[in-house]
Image (spheres, rainbow, N blue to C red):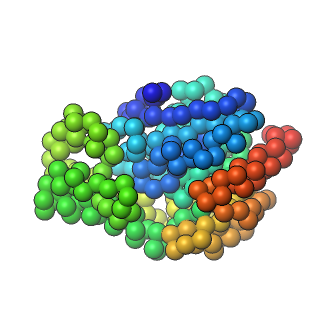
Amino acid sequence: MPTAQINGAEIYYEQAGNGPSIILSSGGLQGLASGYHSVMEPLSSRYQVIAYDRRFGGRSRSPLVVQSWDLVCEDLFGLMDHLEIDEAYLGGGSFGAAISLGCAVRRPERVRAIFPSNIAGGVICDSYLSMKLYKSADIAINHGINAVVSAFDSGDQFSPFSPEIAQHDRKYRLDLEGMATEDFAQVMKDTIYALFDAPFLTLGMTENMLRSIRVPTMVMPGENDIHPRRLAELVHRLVPNCQWAEVPTHGKAPDQYSQRVLQFLDGVAGKPR
């Protein structure tokens, strides 16, 4: 099981193919490499494709720390360092789209191009994700951290947040449940502020940040209240020279998604840096 020690976390990742590197970041507060299994094979026909479990998802493990946009981007760059990748093409859906956009702003010299999809944000999205975190804090204070961990349900999008590894690793769970309840709850509340208490137009991105992006970009729209189409249209307008791709999400139409991404990347590869 390949893992990398990154910023105090052990990050699980998967690789397929050879060639220039594509890194895919999944959505949600945790993010699972398995979310991109359906597209890794077609994309790896011409590229090295890497997907990873973010620090609180799947087989990755991390001390309970505040998630911030800086941290999730530095985790991705740390994975690149571990794999000795100087620059990469970045994709992602929902929360993962915010990571690809954020990386393009923070360290554009390491980002060859981005293709964010299922752009998330707005009051419903922020309320939904904040609710999961606040629910964890509230349950911990009133019923204990063990009740939060026991309430984890990957099939229930409204279940409270806790690191998934606690479901499988007894020592990790005992260490997590051994935290002071007040400290656990404070991490949840501080994460809410870190992720949402700013004038973001889409997850993690202000208007000025979007306007500052200079790497080649292709955006693909979402189709529900958490991923409103209007937000993809907003990104398309604000990011200079941004391309638009009218394709379903990778989960619904993996072949169509992969074909359009490969077309975009082939066009980028033919242009000077």
Residue at the left extreme of this rendering? 143
Q: Residue at x 68, y 70 (%)?
A: 233
Q: Is residue 263 above or below residue 135?
A: above
Q: Quadrant of the C terminus?
A: top right
Say which of 77 and 209 sits in front: 77
Tell me where residue 79 appears, x and y as whole percent: 53, 33
Q: Is residue 107 visible?
A: no
Tell me where residue 81 appears, x and y as whole percent: 56, 29
Tell me where residue 74 appears, x and y as whole percent: 50, 40
**Residue 14 image-quadrant placement:** top right
Q: Residue at x 36, y 62 (%)?
A: 156
**Residue 158 image-quadrant placement:** bottom left
Say which of 126 and 260 sits in front: 260
Q: Residue at x 59, y 37 (%)?
A: 50
How many dots with numbers?
0
Tell me where residue 257 appears, x and y as whole percent: 69, 54
Say which of 227 and 217 sits in front: 227
Q: Residue at x 67, y 31 (%)?
A: 17
